[in-house]
Image (spheres, rainbow, N blue to C red):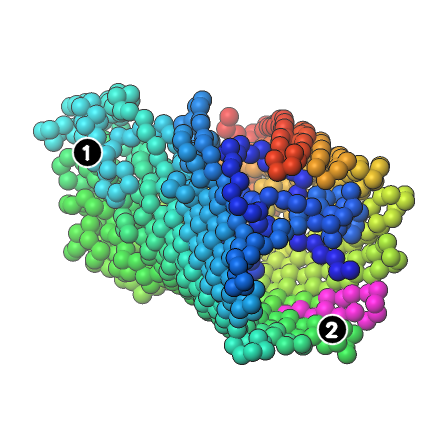
Amino acid sequence: MKKSVRSIRTTRLPVRLTTIALGVGMAISQMALADSGQGVDTWLGNALNPRAVYNFEIRDPDGLGANENPRTPTGFLFVDPDMVKPWTKAGDSGWVYRGNVEAGGISVSGNEKRRGFVRYKDLTDGIYLNNFHVEVENQQSANYFEAFGGGISNDDQYAALRFGRYNDWRVRTFFNETRHVFTTNWKSLFVGDGSGNLKLSPQARANGINPGGVNGAGTAFNGATAADQQIFARAGMSAALAATAEGDLSLTRKKGGARLDMNLGEEGKWKVFASYTNEKREGARPFSAVGTATGGGTYSTEMAEPIDYDTHDFLAGLNYANDLSQFNLSVSASLFRNHIDTLTWENPWPVAATVNGLTAAVGGVQTQFFDLYPDNDYYNVKGEYARNFPDFYKGKFTAVVSLARSKQDDKLQPYTTNPNVTIPGVTSTVPWNSTAALYKDHADAKIDTTLIDLSFALKPVDALGIKIRGRYFETDNDTTFYNCNRNATYDVADVNGKNTLTYGGCTGYWGRINGQAVLINLANTTAGYQVNHFGNIPWDRKEYLGSISADYRLSNFASVNGSYEYEQIERSYREVDKTKEHKFKVGYTNRAIAENGTLRVSYEYDNRDGSNYDPYANYAEVDAGVILEANGIVPTATNQISLINLLGSNVNPLGRKFDVADRDQNILNLRYNHIITPELDLGTSIQLKRVNYPDSAFGRTDEAQDSINFDLNYQPSRETNFYAFYSYQNGRQKQRGSQGGTQGVISATNGVCSDGGNAFWNQGLTLQENLMRAILCLSPDSSLSHSWGNQWEVASTDRSHSLGFGLRQMFGKLMVDANYSYTDTRSKISYNLVNPAGATAAV
């Protein structure tokens, strides 16, 4: 007799408050909605219907559920599958049908406006259509029709329509809607939430908050001094918010689409498919902007970011399959459109005449803006091939090749929306609030990726399986942009007579509009050249991976497995040019240990190392030194010191970023399941993880995580299931840093390290090499302002206890499902500041 398993449902179901349901019509089978294909949503549902379709369930007397205590092939208890109830015939036409509907009423009480309750669902008092499902097919012509949905007319509704002819063609359509509530007590200083133009609210203006922090006469805020203007502004904003009513801040996602699948030819070896989906997101979400205010310090402005997105996804492909080979070719495109290009708001803070050397029009900086996500396109071509070699150790070869491009050509925004802006010491022939002051007026950005993945599996003998894999991945990033005004010059020339600098195809002034320029004044021998970024960093990388794994069956109940993996990553503009990682893993499985037990054990060791660590690599291509060197400018002694001291305050040469640092990792996993009685299982799992960073004098130095879990599963019958669990996890992490101070700063008088070391500047080296040489001039284990004498250490420990239990009971067509869980997590953080005699430390 043929056995079949249609589904295995987990015994740990979430608590679900369902409607009072009225069953109408015949029950229908549980649909396996998961689909390995692309193009349409593969799973529909909402908060009350996570499975989308619910059925009146009956026992399958012909499947694994025929036993009172069904188990998986490895011995674990599971809830047995359901059986499909028979069709209802519609006369002698060959048509049959089945369906169900769940409807009733909902009453919601309590704090129903709480964000955690309304997020991702829409529950309102009244009559409610929870879900429906109808299925019709003709058993003579093989045509079929299916429709289902739930939450109809609410903001979390979903629906699907599917029809076609079995083994010939099919069409699938769907629609779903989800509401995402960010907050239910939103208050704002602005009106116009959801749009790209925010105006100060009447409440704000009534409390003296005007654009740019000015009064009606265009003078300073309340006529106060710069030091007091922020005080008045904060008081006025607080009063305005207190007078503003609370509201919701949310967005709604609506997504719909369709897909066609069709066989070509009677044999069905060739298939084609095509799909289109559209997703719209509308609403607003929290947003914050930070700036510099009159009187010093920074301010933060909380507002609503408008959301009006439209995404179009296209997919088309071709499949071929015969007894030995399978081939897939697909072409896809995703087009994102943002219908709101920029967010402009009236500035409620006093930013008046001069800020950081930047002079604005009378009345301060009255408006500010932010360029929102640009329209962008993504294209992908992917080919997949698989070939069986039954006469060569039952081998199978698979290959995947994927080429993709992401691009956007957004119209760039000017440095400022405010007119009459000037920068001291700089003359520009174009206004700073025009795109003519930019390096380029369009982004012209693209990122290309290439993936090649090959694998070959074979079985030399029945008990042994071997798999060999190779993978290559590359990212090519072309997103260049520089802070360069090609229509501006420095008023005072450098000692070499230069009023402009040339780099990367741009000749002009290099700096940002806020006055914190990369090069503020070429002739300034007091402040020196600033070490600030003047452009973005186009991170590229190449990944090479090779692995071999094997699984050997020792007996009908036991097996061993092992694997080795080598990964090499080559990075551009990162601290480490190349990292190499070796991963070793061994495992053992025994399904008949201690007669009624199943044991799984695995151990993994990973080792990562790389080329020399260069902490300056992130900055080397986008700071002032590169521009100076490209123009043949040698900094004066004072400016050399300025460059080096600024750099030394930001870079610790002995610090390590953990994602590229040398690392050793050990992981031990153990899982044991014991059948106490046919109805009762007891399981235990343990994981021990140790991570060490042997070359990290500063940064993350080591971490560990220990976990243990006990679970009990009791299933006396198909109708009853009880479970309980307890978990404990202990995580530890250590980190070391160096507090900045005055120790090691370069002396301006003699041009040598403050500890009397050798002169730091060598005209035979490049500027970047001199900078790094100067940082390390004190000793191999200290730097300008990051030294062992100023180091600090922090250790964090997280301990978590979780326990819970649940009960599932069937009463005919009625199911009661209840569970409880409790989690207690405690974190302990300890600090240690090392401060020997003579060291400079900050408290």
Q: Residue at x 51, y 37 (%)?
A: 22
Q: Which mark, by number, is residue 395?
A: 2
* Viewer-side residue, 73 vs 641: 73
* Viewer-side residue, 94 vs 288: 94
Furthest toward the front, the residue is 91
Q: Residue at x 84, y 37 (%)?
A: 677
Query: Percent x, y for residue 573?
Result: 49, 57
Tally of numbered tags: 2
Query: Percent x, y for residue 291?
Result: 31, 37
| Magenta-drawn stretch contains 714 | no
Which stretch appears magenta? 454-467
Q: Is residue 399 left or right of residue 532?
A: right
Under tag 2, what secondary structure?
Answer: strand
| Prevalent SS, magenta region | strand
Identify the residue under disc 1: 211
Residue 502 visible somewhere in the drawing: no
Q: Check the image and report above or below for 38 versus 670.
A: below
Q: Quadrant of the N terminus?
A: bottom right
Three-letter code, disc 1? Pro
| Magenta-drawn stretch contains 465 | yes
* Viewer-side residue, 188 vs 132: 132
